[in-house]
Amino acid sequence: MKRRIISITIVVSLILSFLPVYAADTASVIDYPAEGAELGYLFSLKSEPGIAFDVDSYNGIEVVSEMANIYFSDTIEHIKAVEDIIDIDMIVENWTLSTIEPQIYNNTSVSLFSNETIISPINTDELYLNDPFYEQMWHYDAVKARAFRDNGIDGQGIKVGIIDSGITKEFKDFCDFEDTNFCTGINICAKLDKTDELLYDTKDNQSHGTSVASIICAKANNNYGIAGLMDGCTVIPYKVEDYRCSVFANSGYALITAIDMAYKDGCDVLNISRGTDEELPQSQIDMENKIVNKAIENGMIIMAASGNSGDEDNHIEYPAACDNVIGVGATRPNCEGESICFDFNTNMLKPQNEATNEDICLVGYIRNSVQGFPDNKYAKVDFSTANESVFISAPGINIPAAECRTSRFYPNSITSFLGTSAATPIVSSAAIGVKQMRPYVDTDMFKEILKATAVDLEDEGYDINTGYGMVNFERIYNYVSQMPLTAPEKTTDVSIDYENEQLTGFPLNRAYTVNGENVAVSEDGTLQISEEWFGTTIEIVKLASSEGYENSLPQLIDIPARPASPKVELLEDKYVKGIGSDIWYKEENEANWQSGYDSEDYTIMLKPGTYTFMVKDTDKSFASKPVVVVVDYSVPSEYDIETDIEYNETTDMCSYSVKNNTGDDINAAGIVVVYDKSGILRHLEVINIFPSEGITKELDYGLQAGNTVKFIVWNSLQSMKPKEKMKLSEYTVKAGETNK
């Protein structure tokens, strides 16, 4: 029935645009937000759009994610223009995100270090790594990170996406990203704005993304700066914050676009240190879950910061709280930190007893603070959000990180980073190591690994303060080492799109066979059904993507045979009889199909041309093969038709008539519409043939005062071109003319 609804609705919409009485839309079954949202709207579909939905043909609509069927529109009006050719699932206002910014921790949360001075370790043994700030990297010991590095686990071959403010690889004398494998990435803000000159400019807009990246991939053991936990991985930045462009920066639109691109780029791990400041309505939560659930189908693991509202309201942050995202909280050693004072005149650290009023004195942690510290002697940082979004925790205060801003308060290239934004890349590093060891580990498996290996810090089992506890690389390594070296690829969950005769739902970045033959899946995850598959059961196998995988178990799909083609009988060279509602037809070169009617006696008159007929598809069957019919007869060179509307005051009914002065039947479309006094469409009747003897028919609708009846004639339901010499007939029921 879809195509029939499409045709009639397009007709009605176009008619209304020509009629000045129209004032309001008819009631819609779709739950529309209010018009006028500053950042526009996101809408998703229940299924693949039909072949008639070509986004480029509609103003104000952009594809956000083909894989998840999510689109953007700047106005509700533009969505309403296509609501009858697509199956809309939900429409939401585009929402804003925020950086999970660090909060001041008892006014002693930021410790600044310079490249020239470090705190000398009490332990004088040879350093494990020669990076000057290694002694300030207390998190390295806290999570037992040596277990990965000692066993060659550094992220080699793993793609990591970072959705943040960008990454600046070189600034001042900073060179700690030298030899790190960076991909160019995308400036999402520029992409949404179509600002091509900035599309590949992913330099950091402030410093947040650079700090996050440095915890993961700053080069270790290079006698400079800090040591990233997984410095062998490949990093792809997705910049969602840029003051130079885009009102869509830090919005749901940007986030969903970035997640979609990370999926298409084949990222194994995704780090998101962004969230929502305010409570989201369920529809927006559902929209985030929709893109996340699609993105993880190839095994991508997504980490997100749970937020820093622990000193306030502990509100839930998204995407950290999404069903298949691992939300991360922040921890600290359960002990006093070291007192550190900084002299801004010399850019040097000094003992507290030598500090002046112009210096800043802070409290921080060093490796000596936690050497030999019991695993469970850590606690939630006060600012770390406590709610059900926290799945796991990691060190999140006084973490040495790259700092590419230049100001009095950020005079050096290494600073102390804090917040759940700092804890998240530590858990992401654990995921990177696991994916290197066992590429087949997906979100569900990684959650189980974290549950089994986390160091419990509070109540036994799960708690909202620290989740399942603090991440521990040593326990993870020992656990994962016992897992099988390989596992089957996840079996496909492909479905049939009967309308477009294709299989849909293939995860991207994988290779497949059908019945043992290699096939090429499209970029949108679809595969056209081959003619020889109709009426058979096919076997789909996802091929192993690396040595860590095996071929998947097959998915078996029954492909129904096509229905028989319709028997089309052409009468008197111009009429087709008995075309039921299960058949559609169109003239050659026309874009839209028209549907037949339920009555077998209903006769369709066709103008000269070449027509295609076929049994149409349903949600459980394909269309038949087409039948082509050529209609060839002479037509009058000039039309002469008169239309009229008459009102009967006694019955409160209207009748409409057509006088055909051509002496021959005419193929045209007559539309009779009734509006109430507010201009809302209340009734519609359609005429498909104007016989030579004319038409007189009573309107199938009881009228009331203020109703307006209009009668207009078109070439056809497809062309919508007015016939020559035809006038619009109109009648308005006046007060007193009705017995109602």
Image (cartoon, helix red, strand yellow):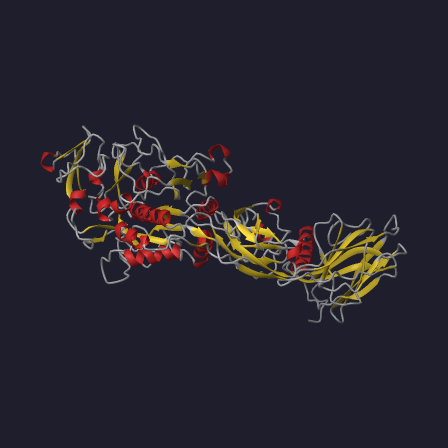
Image quarter (top left, top right, bottom left or bottom right) of the C terminus = bottom right
Image quarter (top left, top right, bottom left or bottom right) of the N terminus = bottom right
**Residue farthest to the right?**
663
- The image quadrant of residue 683 is bottom right
Between 636 and 366, which is closer to the camera in this rendering? 366
Can residue 714 be seen here? The reply is no
**Residue farthest to the left?**
353
Percent position of residue 101, x then y? 31, 45
- The image quadrant of residue 468 is bottom left
- The image quadrant of residue 706 is bottom right
Can residue 692 be seen here? The reply is yes
Give above or below for 434 relative to 5: above
182 left or right, relative to 132: right
451 left or right, relative to 364: right
252 left or right, relative to 222: right
Between 550 and 657, which is closer to the camera in this rendering? 550
359 left or right, relative to 566: left
- Report the residue at 25% width, 32% height from top: 223
Tally the marks.
Answer: 0
- Report the residue at 77% width, 57% height from top: 670
Percent position of residue 233, x then y? 37, 41
Percent position of residue 561, x then y? 67, 61
Percent position of residue 94, x then y? 46, 50
